[in-house]
Amino acid sequence: MTIQYLAQKLVLVREQKPLIHNITNVVVTNFTANGLLALGASPVMAYAKEEVADMAKIAGALVLNIGTLTESEVQAMIIAGKSANEYGVPIIFDPVGVGATPYRTAVAKRILEELKVTIIRGNAAEIANLTGEDWSIKGVDAGDATGNVAQLAVKAARQFSSIVVITGEEDIATDGTQIYSIRNGHPILTKVTGSGCLLSSVIGAFAAVELNKLEAAAAALIYYGVAAECAVKETGDNRPGSFQIELLNQLSLVTPKEIEQLARVEQFQAEGGE
Amino acid sequence: MTIQYLAQKLVLVREQKPLIHNITNVVVTNFTANGLLALGASPVMAYAKEEVADMAKIAGALVLNIGTLTESEVQAMIIAGKSANEYGVPIIFDPVGVGATPYRTAVAKRILEELKVTIIRGNAAEIANLTGEDWSIKGVDAGDATGNVAQLAVKAARQFSSIVVITGEEDIATDGTQIYSIRNGHPILTKVTGSGCLLSSVIGAFAAVELNKLEAAAAALIYYGVAAECAVKETGDNRPGSFQIELLNQLSLVTPKEIEQLARVEQFQAEGGE
Amino acid sequence: MTIQYLAQKLVLVREQKPLIHNITNVVVTNFTANGLLALGASPVMAYAKEEVADMAKIAGALVLNIGTLTESEVQAMIIAGKSANEYGVPIIFDPVGVGATPYRTAVAKRILEELKVTIIRGNAAEIANLTGEDWSIKGVDAGDATGNVAQLAVKAARQFSSIVVITGEEDIATDGTQIYSIRNGHPILTKVTGSGCLLSSVIGAFAAVELNKLEAAAAALIYYGVAAECAVKETGDNRPGSFQIELLNQLSLVTPKEIEQLARVEQFQAEGGE
């Protein structure tokens, strides 16, 4: 896969303006919608049990995010997800904070059991929690343990038969066989709430226009990381307010050319197999 | 009606600082509240069935927005709306995404049946859905079909005995007899989530201080469009993050003088009658 | 207490990055989370009855804010609060808009009766409503009535056996015996929605790292006011959009040195006693 090829996926999103149905947390709704608009996608948020099935089936992707889950919202997620599954709409699942409470862990498991999830995106601790690894004992700082993060992602991908994306200093996207390692982005992203949630929705937008969902995920990660790098060039690395706004600008401004020039991506094969 | 007269309505809002009760979607709450504060109004959000009647009756206007409706919120809207009707508080209704799902359409109809709505604001497709027109078949791009948009607004105004505002490249406000056509604003507004929702609340603020609700709507449209034009002069037309913030600045900075200079408004009579 | 001593509390927050569990209103979630991140704390929002007890017990502080309360959220607040009380986690209570409706007033009383609240923060009208004073008749503009504000805070602190913070032109923090009077900040804060709500969460972050909760509150008030002053120097006092973003920047940038230089704080004893 050439970098040019992945960079061109951005053009597809901007041309097709896919409708992305988000059932997400109350902290990031605005930022997510504005980020998707800046990218060129078409965001919709809908939560009512009475309408989520209808909305999900006309969407290009469904993004489920449990950041501020409530029981009623979880039920809506399941209804929306079943509709998405029925109509072949890809589901992106963001298990925010899974492991922080038993309820959150139980809900994440329920979603993974009841729905066919296309892509799971989380940080290393979240993905480890899903797979049952005792990651926090090994140390939460994913940045130090590069090899293990890819290994963890591969394990999770095989366990859930999903594409798994783990973000951190190094981003990993894998289907359990192919692995993309991406080193774009900037640590200031961790100072902006919802930067991971928005990324999940951006992955949804790329997955809506690209049949190969692993390439969609990799293309989205590179695009998003490059936009963050362009933003931090404008604002410096200690102004999180300005960075948040400039990230929205750059999501709109970034070109395939810039992506080609700035991409830091490697592709390799996972060891072992099923 | 002179432009000076409409421009002065802004002064009324800033002097009286009307309390605007919003029952709105979770995507735009923050932006709406900050926009109303920048204008000089006093926003309040309240959703609990136990308190919305009390809040609506002390408000200068009640804004109902179904962007992320849930059944419980719809019930609160009806309770708040009945209280507003009883106490003579104008209701602004924003039927976000009506037509996208059957539930959304049913809720919009229920609101229009159970409440006396003072002003309805939507885009052409939304208003057409309310009136039962098959607008999407005629083509959704309201910008090309100026004559039809005014005609649609007049039809809706007569059907619902409300003032109807349709926003797009040309904004229309009509009571079914008088028509205002306003050509302020900028396309980048469509890149900021909630720019239409905030406009509905801004119309509420003007309706709170002006007895003639059609003039209130026209004055609000001109003011908002001028603020957007002033903002885009500062940020350019491809930085949606910066534009969103600068719009808040300009909602605070715009003067009646600037409104007079930049207003592009025409007034005419609707053809036919009831 | 020297100013240097209070200024150093900021270092503690940045080093310890306390987890702050917010059950707050839908208007301010994003701004609150970004403000806490900018400060260096670690925000979490969680609302589900099924998980709030688990989240509250691992938090450094629990912030309860009734800005857009619903019955289900109030129940979650009580559950979270009881867990916080059991595990010694300080509770900060922000009675937004108490007095505006009977329901809001009833909920605030219920929270104060069922939970041991560590710190209550509101404006003068809100605190007066809690104590049963007919403050609105005396005039709502707390800025004119300095002496009375301190008196009101002392009365409330004694009545609820809590630390009470009243913010306005002059901020007061008192345990009913010691009084801090702080004159930092800027009136443009009232033009940014959630600036008070974020302050409550910032107080939570300081309370999470400092055993003396009155000093924690005073240190938080000075820090926040100084950040606002630094922000307004950058943006001027009539650009609320830019100010909101710059405040986030300054919450990240402000140093103990700047706090020492800019603090305007006095400490004195309350008259009378219990």
Image: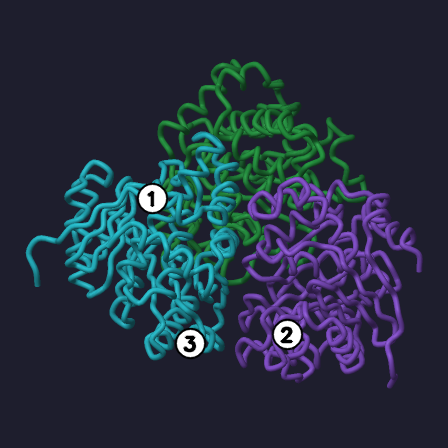
Chain colours: A purple, B green, C cyan
Above/below status of A248 relative to C45: above
| Labels in figure, total | 3
Which image quadrant for residue B123?
Answer: top right
Q: CA distance from mark 3 to mark 2?
A: 20 Å
Residue C49 visible in the current orientation: yes
- Amino acid carrying label 2: it is Ala
What residue is pinned by disc 1? B58
What residue is pinned by disc 3? C57
Residue situated in front as seen by the camera: C263 or B125? C263
Quadrant in which the C terminus of chain B appears: top right
**Mark 1 belongs to chain:** B
Residue situated in front as seen by the camera: C238 or B87? C238
Residue A261: x and y in percent read 85, 47
Crowd rating for badge 3 (residues with CA inside 10 Å; few <14, some 14–19, many 20+): many
Residue C15: x and y in percent read 47, 62
Secondary structure of the residue carrying tag 1 is loop
At 54% across and 36% down in the image, what residue appears?
Answer: B162
